[in-house]
Image: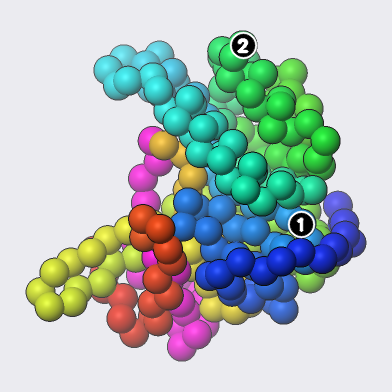
Amino acid sequence: MNLAIRTTAILPADLVTVAGERAVCDPRGVLYFPELSLLAVSDLHLEKGSSLARRGALIPPYDTAATLARLQAVIADYAPRIVISLGDSFHDGEGASRLHDDFRERLEQLMAGRDWFWIAGNHDPDAPADLPGETVRELAVASLVFRHEPSKGQAGGEVAGHLHPCARIVQRGRSVRRRCFAGDGSRMIMPAFGAYTGSLNVLDRAYAGLFNRESLVAYMMGKDRIFALPGAMLRAG
């Protein structure tokens, strides 16, 4: 599917460029393209708590409430015309059907009046039950292609999720490890947004061949800002 939508907007801070398209790396974990009025979010993993509970894991079932509250805040701030959820929006194929009525209503309110696309993920390959929006395998918008799993090798304009990237640096003997956006100007891999999601270091072999290592930048998520770290500063682990 291809969309060719372009609007004007004021450009906030923390700007990056992906295949010539300007975007904002928001420290809350979303990517916003002002000129396209498009917000991308990845790996919500809604209802992960209830999924794990069904398998006997004793964890608080508060992840969906927390994730939706954060998503509501960023959508209120940016007011996008298009929202793309980059796969694994639900932790399993039955996650949407387990949504509490209050959560379903909140999600539908967020979707109202805008184009909403569910990218099929490995956890949720089918359309979410009884929810609006369109489910697609991938979506092309302007010079970008949005999909869940990154393609092998170089893929100009790709915005993907799945790998849950994080970065680690060591300065003055102190190690800092946080979620990040990972990009080289041509491709961007987004951090997981869900409350109960883990992360994988961008130097892990799972990322091999995805980036031009000389151009790799990890946009580490701080509390209130993004820290752009060149690949040479990153450490494994």
**Which SS type dominates the magenta stretch?**
loop
Q: How crowded is mark 1: few (under 14 residues within 10 Å), some or many (20 or more)?
A: some
Residue 211 part of the magenta segment = yes
Q: Which of 194 and 206 is in front in this view?
A: 194
Packing grade of label 2 (10 A; few <14, some 14-19, many >=20) is: few
Looking at the image, residue 179 sits to the left or right of residue 192; the answer is left
Q: Residue at x 58, y 19 (%)?
A: 103
Q: What stretch is highlighted in magenta?
A: 196-221
Q: Which of 55 and 161 is in front in this view?
A: 161
Q: Mark 2 points at which residue?
A: 101
Compared with 85, 236 (above or below) is below
How far from the left and from the top, in percent, is residue 188? 58, 67
Disc 2 from disc 1: Cα separation: 29 Å
Q: Which residue is drawn at 56% across and 40% down?
A: 73
Residue mark closest to the camera, 2 vs 1: 1
Q: Which SS class for mark 2?
A: helix
Q: Which amino acid does label 1 sit on?
A: Ser
Q: Say which residue label 1 marks.
A: 37
Q: Residue at x 38, y 19 (%)?
A: 61
> Can I make out residue 163 in this image?
no
The percent coordinates of residue 216 (x first, y second) are 47, 79
In this rendering, position of residue 165 left or right of residue 76? left
Is residue 100 or residue 187 the one in the foreground?
100
Earlier sequence position, callout 2 versus callout 1:
1
108 in magenta: no
- Give the quadrant of residue 60: top left
Give x and y (percent) for residue 80. Answer: 73, 49
Q: What secondary structure is marked by label 1? A: loop
> Can the viewer see residue 108 in this picture?
yes
